Amino acid sequence: MFVKFIALILFTLLIMLINLCLGDLTVAPIEALQAVFGQAGSSEIHDVIFGIRLPRLLTAFVVGLALATSGYLLQALSRNDLADPYLTGVSSGAAVGVACAMLCKLDFQTIPFFAFIGGITASFFVASIARGSGQYGVSVAKLLLAGIALSSVAGALITLAMTTFGTQLMAQGLYLWILGGISGRNWQELIPTVSYVAVGLIVALAAAKQLNLLALGEETASSLGLNVGRSQLIILSAAVLLASSAVALSGMVGFVGLVAPHLSRRLFGRGARLQLVCSGLTGAILVLFSDLLARTLSPGQELPLGTLMALIGGPFFIYLLSFSLDQVHSQ
Amino acid sequence: MTSVSERKILKAEQVGLGYANKGKVATNIIEHINLVLEPGEVLAIQGPNGSGKSTLMKGLARQLKPSAGTISLDSQNIWNMSIVDFARQVAYVPQSLETPHDMTVNELVRLGRNPHQSWWSNQLSKADIATIDSALDRCGLTRLSTKKLNELSGGEKQRALIAMALAQEPHFILMDEPTANLDFRYQLEVIAIIKELKEQKIGIATILHDLNLSARIADQIALIGPPPSASPSTIVAKGTPQEVLKEDLLRAVFDVELAFVHDEKSNLDLYVPISISKKSATLNGAAD
């Protein structure tokens, strides 16, 4: 387990280094690292590495970390491996929040906050539908269907708001952002969002024990002295905060929260504390790798990150669905 | 009745329980429940399917808030206690864990220490480890402690759940059909554990379907009557097995004809359901 964990960290660092070096301008690893520490060989390298690639790389890292952790938390909460911020409509809710904030011309200090308001509203809506009339437990089929419905409504709301209130330039910018991408992200956008993500991660790590108890089911958890409602609210808030921050940074990048916890569960089992860290890192690797492909597959042109993730994640979701369809049916 | 303050007592007084149904007022499933459970006592709850046994169990386990009456522990309303405080004194053993889980027995039983730990820490003290080891030992799971739950047999899983409850160091353990889906041998294993817990002065309330098992281990049996025409059910008889397991009562409540056999070899009274009785045998006749 320890060896696997170290390997995961090394692999994360390796893919970060590759992302730093590859692109329209290929930079040698040593030179790239020198540039990171402010000792670039030339001003051109400094501009490319420090001005463009490093913030972009860190954005990819943060987005992957946040989405995967959020997905893990939602899966633990709903006790189903098919939950993810994108599929449950949390991301769409957050996107409405971001669109509102953009229309009001708010800056990046407050955009993640608006995303959070949108995300938490969506999550309450979806959770109340999925919970049904029973005292405990959620219906996974309802959870996913409510997520789909909510996503459509949210998409329509954003379009409506943009065509009514926004300028054409704004609408274009928003459209590109929704497609999901992290190109052109700079330090001014990254740094405030990181603080939101940090809060979400700290809360999630502090709730690791509650996650282990909730894994036994709400009834058993409560008989072990856990205040189930309060724990769920705290964990849900952390999950939404993480997903919303990611949406604010990178738009609608789907399936990271679905795929990463799965891979990490295969490798590291289900213990909450380890799983929180490892899902997060796996998600970061996934987004870093996708972004590398997005930047390098067709030189001179860039694929939107969200499109690429959908190409990877969509089939994976179908694969999972075909294996757990009976489970979805029975609930 | 005077209650000694030292002695722990779990008590239900005029309790009604039901489920709220989205905005509508909850309709009670059971009503007018009066029960007293003392340490070292085994209370068996019996009754037909749908009579509200599990609902009563959820009420006693502080999972479901009574719509009427009070459930108290040492004359303190359990809903005025903190959930942690309650979990230190009363443990609940569910019928089964909701999902197959790749958690080990040891990991599961460790979680039983939760009410004794701070909210964020799962660090185990030496005393915690001793309690966990003893819980595993009492349930005969020491050798299986590193096995995963989904590798266990039904009986072993049930024992793991009981071991988790024991790790809570409770005064009372509530069990929702601990012998459901178990074959004879595993049923007897569970019964043996219950007997041992009784000797350690733990009060046990358990739902049992098998009259013969109840007769062997229960100090008290509460027989819950079926709802005649949609009204809430209630306890129709309560007392020692000899008092409650009577032909007319059982026939009325379960609507079956039973045979009673005394086995000389084991010196046990045995109950054998023979056939479904005619509907004419009414509950009202028996409850008087």
Image (tube, coloured by chain):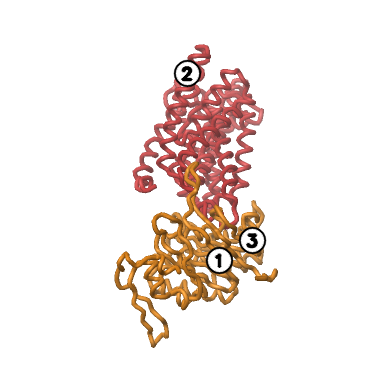
Chain colours: A red, B orange
Could one spot residue A28 in this view of the protein? no
Q: Nearer the viewer, mark 2 or mark 1?
A: 1
Q: Using residue A104 as the reference point, say whether residue B56 is left or right of it.
A: left
- Residue B119 position (above or below residue A108): below
Which of the chains bears the disc numbered 2?
A
Cα gap from disc 3 to disc 1, whole angstroms: 36 Å
Cα gap from disc 2 to disc 1, whole angstroms: 62 Å
Which of the chains bears the disc numbered 3?
B
Mark 3 element type: loop
* Position of residue B104 measured from the top left corner of the image (x, y, whole percent): 50, 60
Which of the chains bears the disc numbered 1?
B
Quick check: marks 2 and 1 in contact, CB under 8 Å?
no
Could one spot residue A59 in this view of the protein? yes
- Choose between A45 and A293: the one closer to the eye: A293
Q: Which residue is mark 3?
A: B124
Is the same chain shared between marks 3 and 1? yes
Q: Residues within 10 Å of mark 1 (few under 14, many from 20)?
A: some
- Choose between A47 and B85: the one closer to the eye: B85
Disc sitting over residue A160 in the figure? 2
All told, the count of numbered labels is 3
Disc sitting over residue A261 in the figure? none
Amino acid at circle 3: Leu
- Residue A230 position (above or below residue A62): below
